Amino acid sequence: MIHHVMFFWFRKDSPQAEVEEVLAGIRSFATIPAVRDVSISENRGFPESSAPFTHAAILTFEDWEDKNEYLGDDLHQSVRRKAMSVLGELKTISVDTGRAAAPSLADLAAHLHDAELTRRTIPPLSEQVPGLSVADAYRIQQLNVSRRLRDGGVIVGQKVGLTSVAMQEQLGVDEPDYGVLFADMLVDDGQPIPVSGLIQPRVEAEVAFIMARELRGPGVTEADALEAIAGALPVIEVIDSRISAWKIGLTDTIADNASCAKVVRGEVVTPIAEIDLRTIGMVLTINGEVVSTAAGAAVLGNPIRGLVWLANKLAEFGVSLRPGDLVLAGALHAAISVTAGMSVHAEFANIGGITAEFTS
């Protein structure tokens, strides 16, 4: 294991906005496939022996080859050029602590990827690596996102999960999680979905938003989010877990891209100027029989809060929501298992209905 340690300080005349941009850029190194982990902190105690350095960052790599790959990465080079314009000084050291005995984050990401390709399940990652952190889980997710991008995948948006109080209490967490949506996950209204291409699918009806302009955290408010969206539309998300028997904890579902699989999206985007998202009603039927009803308030009290949380969370990774992005705000009800032959319809007040048809 290679630990690359950076010590640095900012010139006093450096604009605060540029300082924050550099810090966000360093955090974004976590998206580089060769980087296993990134941590950064400010030297608030500031002992005399550490002067003048005010910050430290530690990047972890599997081996020297990965470190060299990081050094030549375009993102690293771009952030470094920006940093050199505001840093007073930068010192680095790299140390080799040997290879970890437990599966690496790259190994875990590869296991999830293979499980999706072969449509099989694997044991919970949280059992394979006790103490797996949320940061580790997002890193695993990012490794597979990078893998899909290298294979030609196109990101079209994000999804927010674990928005209900019941689910948060079940997993012992106090905030949602998120996953990345790709173009090949999108399904048209009523288009058949073969269950043979999935593992253990479930459905969730959700309010989704289309972004009209960029929304970048931190500090995003509900007012900011409302101004940034073009409107709302109905979706049925098909979630699927690569973890055996849905035996998931928080880190398992984060690593597994928040259990994303498919998204059946409506065609009409409805402006929300005169819609109360909290009270918007939804009726879910399977083969014509009502199986669930809910209102928008089931999502953090208001679906727009899912968007606010997401924009601020993404800021930790130097990422923003882009114009045209599809954002799923979170499920209005408990997930429901589906099998071949089911026709699932969600009817929303004000924004219309959506149907997911499941075939063998």
Image: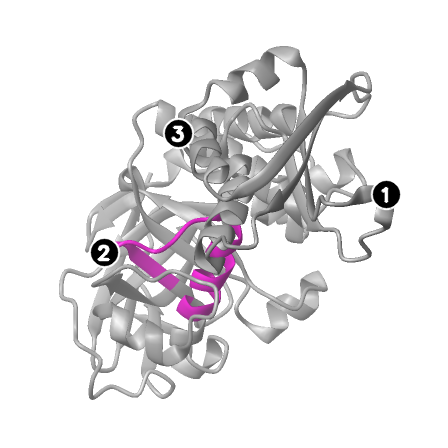
Query: Looking at the picture, which amino acid does disc 2 mark?
Result: Pro
For the N terminus, give its image quadrant: top right
In the image, residue 311 sits, relative to residue 244, either above or below, namely: below
Query: Looking at the picture, which amino acid does disc 1 mark?
Result: Ser
Q: Of circles 2 and 1, which is in front?
A: 1
Residue under the point 51% across and 48% down? 24
Residue 152 percent coordinates (x, y): 30, 26
Q: Are marks 3 and 2 in contact (CB under 8 Å)?
A: no
Query: Looking at the picture, which amino acid does disc 3 mark?
Result: Arg
Q: Which residue is mark 2?
A: 323
In the image, residue 356 sits, relative to residue 304, either above or below, namely: above
Residue 151 percent coordinates (x, y): 35, 23
Residue 341 percent coordinates (x, y): 32, 49
In the image, residue 119 sits, relative to residue 349, either above or below, namely: above
The region drawn magenta spans: 307-328
In the image, residue 14 sits, relative to residue 272, either above or below, namely: above
Q: Of circles 3 and 2, which is in front?
A: 2
Q: Which residue is mark 3?
A: 148
Q: Label 1: state its secondary structure.
A: helix
Q: How many numbered marks have been drawn onto this rendered protein structure?
A: 3
Q: Which residue is mark 1?
A: 49
Q: In this rendered view, identify the residue nearer to me: 239 or 51.
A: 51
Residue under the point 40% across and 25% down? 74
The part of the image, by quadrant, that contains residue 173 is: bottom right
Q: Which mark is residue 36?
A: none
In the image, 110: left or right of 332? right
Q: Residue furthest top?
A: 65
